[in-house]
Amino acid sequence: MTAIGTTTAAGAPRLPGWVRYEVTAFAVVTALGLIGYLVFPFDLALLTRIIAVTFLVLSLDLVTGYAGVVTLGQAAIFGVAAYAVGNACLAGITDPVMLLGVGIIAGALMGLVSGVLISRFSALPQLVISIAFGQLVAALANKLAQFTGGSDGLAGFAPSAVLGVFEFDIFGRTSFGFSLVVLAVVLALLLRFVQSPFGLMCRGIRDDALRARMIGTAVYPRLIVMYGVSGAVAGVGGALSAINVGVVSLHSVSFEMSAEALVMLVVGGAGHLLGAVFGSILFQIFGHFVGSTNPFHWMTIVGGTLILITLFAPKGLYSAFASAMAKFRKSRVSQ
Amino acid sequence: MTAVPLKVTDLTAGYGPTRIISNVSFEVPAGRKLVVLGRNGVGKTTLLSAVMGLCTQHGGTIALGEEALSGRKTSRRAMMGLGYVPQTRDIFQSLTVEQNLSTGIRAGSDARLDEAYELFPRLAERRRNLGSQLSGGEQQMLSIARTLLGHPSILLLDEPLEGLAPIICDELMSTITELASSRAISIILVEQQIERALVFGEDAIIIERGQIAWEGAVSALRADRDLIETYIGVGIH
């Protein structure tokens, strides 16, 4: 890694490579958000929803893309965090930042619990356990109506102003701005996290768990911790969803939600946080606009597009884009 | 870490119910270099796997210094001081050389990446390359370097020269020899290239059908070429 405090030839201070990468990612996400705000000023609720779901896809990327754990139960963590935030708000904690903390804690705890169960297994048994875990949580959410509102959903809570200043408005500006800032910050932190020794070893475990054991890595505890971190990220998404929408429905913990998140991750590119972000944004915007322009055949169009993407970019759109950029740079150098 | 003796007593091990080695006993005193010789399929790799806890141990004991290893997990054995470089190399393909090396450094350790680059300068040149972009020799260097960053007290090398060009073999053996003399570390080397192994080792065991057929000093083995002819079936010059 480049040492901190290096200078350019002109003598100007230059940030080390990894900081530049994270600052760039922060700037790109913020810029994308601002473009979204300007281009779709009347669809801020959709953009806010996209950001909340992006956290779910990011959390899935941590366990699936970075640690090799295949799961179809990640929405359970997202949904439980959303319910926790809704209940906390009903109990009198209305500060959005505090509620975000509640979501993070609830998500992390759920992540640890699911990690203990799911990462104990591998391959198909792992997948089955993850589905069973998700279904169990969904069934409980339906039964425990006093905490979840059952099939009616949990409603009737209203968070206070963000930082005591920015009230939530009917146009969704505060929700969008709050969510965008949280996404940019969390993404920058996660980019650092996956490059840490812990993050690198998780990628090593994904590549070859046996080899990781041979160099002294206790694989199972690491995967549980990774699940905890992933749960905290999903918890942020669940919290934002509850804070911004004011309703938590059973869909938040559903199998469909987990499956959609996996599709978004595969489309964007598993094992790349930016791939997860782009996959989530593209899939949801594409689905929304195809659905609104062609309500009769939109699922066919979305399904066909997914097949094409998987055929021509099996490692996801981010990898295809990165590979195309690398070829472009190479051709320019050789000219 | 400082070198620690390894003592294997009446070890019987294999895969599942199948026993590959039986009643194997030997000792590697601290700082010594032991070479394990034998034909293909006699149980050399199984022996190292059993020491590392990667296969089923049916009987016997394994001790690193005063600590018993039997029954302990592979990761625990590595933490206790065993450094294993398997035949398959098994570097992390999706990580760069530098990232691969970083995974070998344990939390709280004073190990530095420079240690690996000093040992294998070629890795420094390839630090930004992915594991999948390295040649066989470079992968082997990376595998050894990463294991050494864990500061093991004993290094288990399973056929590190397999499939490598002669010039790379020379380079690698010269580095391993230098390593053995400059660090407090014991080494067990399983190798099919008999001449190179005998130049490197101080003690030797020959395995035949899962059991130790001969053990002694390398000098004795070099002096009695008929032994090698008998057990391994190759002549040395």
Image (cartoon, coloured by chain):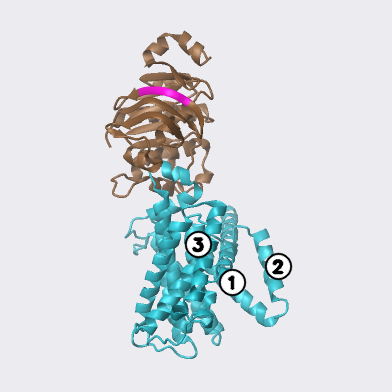
Numbered disc total: 3
Do badges 1 and 3 share one subunit?
yes
User: Which chain contains the residue that carries disc 2?
Assistant: A
User: What is the quadrant of the N terminus of chain B in the image?
Assistant: top left
User: Which chain contains the residue that carries disc 3?
Assistant: A
| Point 52% across, 15% down: residue | B234
Image mark for residue A61: 3
Instruction: Name the spot of residue B186 as percent of width and height, x first.
Output: 33, 29
Under circle 1, the secondary element is helix
Q: Which residue is mark 1?
A: A282
Do badges 1 and 2 share one subunit?
yes
Which amino acid type is shown beneath numbered disc 3? Asp
Image mark for residue A73: none
Position of A228 with respect to B110 (left or right) is right
Q: Colour of chain B?
A: brown
Q: Nearer the viewer, residue A276 or B63?
A: B63
Q: Which residues are magenta?
A: B21-26
Query: Would residue B187 be seen by someone viewing this image from the given angle?
Result: yes
Image mark for residue A304: 2
Q: Gap in Å between the C-alphas at discs 1 and 2?
A: 15 Å
Viewer-nearest of discs 1 and 2: 2
